[in-house]
Image: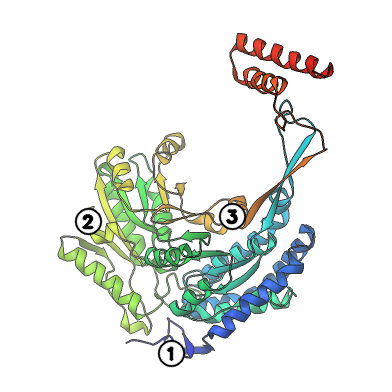
């Protein structure tokens, strides 16, 4: 069964748990995209000049609006993505509320003018400071898997920094995007400061070709390459948060009963449709059988179903194409020698795009399920001889977003974490910092570049303008050159950077140049 999500004119929103039509939204025309960007540029003229405290008042108002509508928002998110209602609240709405809190408490520290200390010997009478200026109109291009928390967190940071925003969401979650714009309207943000463009690849291309000033993209590696290529033609700065292949390293000293449940959750939350889902498990031989047995037991207890039902653990995949993609990857792995330990089946009987949470044993490092992002409820398991092998296999990946180390010895786990090639490494847990704006989020290698959340994102959404001030004193490097200028400059270099004898020599040169200058020679 295949549902078409959009035509040339409209996007049709589908509930992936039931395949019912939830609504339709119009695809934006080129004229509408141009107007959205133009309105953003116009709104910027006043917005960027507002005191930071005033902009943060808007963020506070937005926070109150989101909280007051949290139940309605959670229902909209669950119906359009399929994820359980509790996940819509904790992984989507809570993260946005936390972002508002963090910005209100911390933005002033990172965005206020900053004094620059100059070398007073060479630059007497000068002052310097940095301003953190907004870039302009930021295009936020967001995915279907976290259609609320991912775009809104970046939008809030961009607005706090004084920018305008145009949101282009995934066509698979168009209704959540409509709800986002309603929230900003209800919070009474200035007209045109936040706009929405609906559509797919063609609309993305046109948006990037318009008069925007930065792109923040979250999505697949393939999509990231396309975005980077389009932006490069205009030298547009880009933030790319792309795919992941989270490797969990389980050391022999781990308590199996304690770690099994968080590993299962890390693999299967949001039906595995998270860029930081655990998609590889490297477990030391001595506890492998015990851990696998416990993982199978917990996985088989998980309840598939409609996310609106309170006892649902795992919802559907987003659509039919994703369902078939997961099945193809598993079938290929099995044909190459892998064994299905739990799950492995499409569940047509449930009425939507459901796939059983799956554990794979007998997996080899060379298999596609280990090398490529799965983006579904599948956990390949590989037994290793020791931690050195686990580290080597973890780093044997073109992706580098997240990883985790599981051990009773926290200090030793931290040592291993430093050897892992990833932007985020957790110890005895995973994924949770995605809802924490205090911690930076982003990857290396083909997982992208730039960071979401924290001061790192705020500073990505501004440019640094340095202001230098001279009180009209004549400087020794100005014309006309002469012996005094030469002695002063050479002496200063010797005084600041030479050894002890050279510093004394430099000091004598400087004193001599002052004496000659005072005598008018």
Residue 143 visible in the picture = yes
Query: From the image, which quarter does the N terminus lie in?
Result: bottom left
Label 3's element? helix
The residue at the point 37 percent across, 66 percent down is 222
Earlier in the chain: of badge 3 and badge 2, it is 2
Earlier in the chain: of badge 1 and badge 3, it is 1
Q: CA distance from mark 2 to mark 1?
A: 40 Å
Q: Nearer the viewer, residue 513 or 504?
A: 513
Which circle marks residue 363 in the picture?
2
Q: CA distance from mark 3 to mark 2?
A: 40 Å
The residue at the point 38 percent across, 43 percent down is 254
Q: CA distance from mark 1 to mark 3?
A: 36 Å
Earlier in the chain: of badge 2 and badge 1, it is 1
Up/down of 332 relative to 128, above or below: below
Judge from the rendering whether residue 125 lies leftward or rightward of residue 365; answer left or right: right
Give the residue number, with chain letter if any, for mark 3. 460
Dot in front, 1 or 3? 3
Which circle marks residue 239 in the picture?
none
Which circle marks residue 7 in the picture?
1
Label 1's element? loop
Judge from the rendering whether residue 396 lies leftward or rightward of residue 436; answer left or right: left
Q: Nearer the viewer, residue 119 or 458?
A: 119
Q: How is the image coloured?
A: rainbow
Mark 3 closeness class: few <14, some 14–19, many ≥20 residues within 10 Å: many
Q: Position of residue 491 (x, y in %)?
A: 66, 18
Q: Quadrant of residue 313?
A: bottom left
Q: Position of residue 466 (x, y in %)?
A: 69, 46
Up/down of 268 relative to 34, above or below: above
Q: Position of residue 480 (x, y in %)?
A: 72, 30
Judge from the rendering whether residue 142 lies leftward or rightward of residue 55; answer left or right: left
Label 2's element? loop
The residue at the point 62 percent across, 18 percent down is 494
């Amino acid at each position: 069964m295949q549902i078409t999500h959009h035509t040339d004119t409209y996007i049709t929103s589908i509930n992936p748990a039931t395949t019912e039509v939830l609504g339709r939204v119009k695809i934006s025309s080129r004229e509408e995209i141009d107007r959205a960007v133009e309105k953003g540029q116009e709104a910027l003229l006043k917005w960027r000049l507002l005191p930071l405290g005033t902009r943060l008042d808007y963020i506070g108002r937005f926070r109150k609006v989101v909280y007051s509508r949290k139940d309605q928002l959670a229902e909209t998110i669950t119906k359009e993505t399929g994820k359980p209602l509790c996940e819509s609240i904790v992984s989507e709405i809570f993260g946005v509320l936390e972002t508002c809190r963090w910005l209100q408490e911390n933005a002033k520290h990172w965005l206020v003018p900053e004094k620059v200390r100059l070398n007073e010997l060479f630059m007497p009478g000068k002052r310097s400071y940095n301003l953190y200026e907004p870039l302009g109109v930021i295009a936020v291009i967001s995915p279907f898997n976290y259609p609320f928390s991912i775009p809104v967190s970046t939008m809030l940071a961009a607005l706090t920094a004084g920018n305008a925003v145009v949101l282009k969401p995934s066509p698979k979650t168009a209704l959540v995007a409509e709800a986002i714009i309603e929230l900003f309207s209800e919070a009474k943000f200035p007209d045109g400061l936040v706009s929405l463009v609906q559509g797919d690849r063609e609309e993305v291309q046109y948006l990037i070709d318009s008069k925007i000033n930065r792109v923040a993209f979250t999505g697949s590696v393939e999509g990231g390459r396309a975005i980077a290529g389009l932006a490069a033609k205009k030298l547009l700065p880009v933030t790319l948060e792309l795919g992941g292949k989270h490797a969990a390293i389980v050391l022999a000293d781990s308590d199996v009963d304690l770690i099994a449940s968080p590993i299962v959750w890390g693999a299967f939350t949001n039906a595995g449709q998270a860029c930081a889902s655990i998609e590889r498990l490297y477990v030391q031989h001595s506890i492998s059988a015990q851990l696998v047995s416990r993982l199978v037991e917990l996985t088989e207890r998980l309840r598939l179903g409609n996310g609106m039902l309170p006892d649902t653990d795992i919802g559907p995949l987003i659509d039919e194409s994703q369902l078939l993609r997961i099945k193809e990857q598993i079938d290929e792995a099995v044909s190459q020698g892998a064994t299905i330990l739990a799950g492995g089946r499409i569940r047509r009987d449930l009425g939507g795009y459901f796939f059983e949470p799956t554990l794979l044993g007998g997996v080899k490092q060379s298999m596609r399920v280990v090398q490529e992002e799965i983006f579904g409820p599948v956990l390949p398991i590989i037994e290793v001889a020791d931690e050195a092998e686990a580290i080597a296999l973890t780093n044997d990946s073109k992706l580098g977003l997240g990883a985790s180390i599981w051990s009773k010895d926290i200090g030793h786990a931290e040592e291993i974490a430093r050897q892992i090639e990833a932007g985020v490494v957790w110890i005895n847990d995973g994924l949770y910092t995605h809802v924490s704006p205090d911690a930076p989020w982003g990857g290396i290698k083909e997982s992208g570049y730039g960071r979401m959340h924290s001061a790192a994102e705020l500073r990505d959404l501004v440019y640094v303008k340095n202001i230098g001030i001279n009180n009209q004193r004549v400087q020794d490097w100005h014309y006309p050159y002469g012996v005094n200028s030469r002695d002063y400059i050479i002496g200063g270099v010797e005084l600041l950077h030479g050894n002890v004898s050279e510093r004394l020599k430099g000091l004598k040169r400087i004193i001599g140049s002052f004496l000659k200058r005072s005598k008018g020679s």
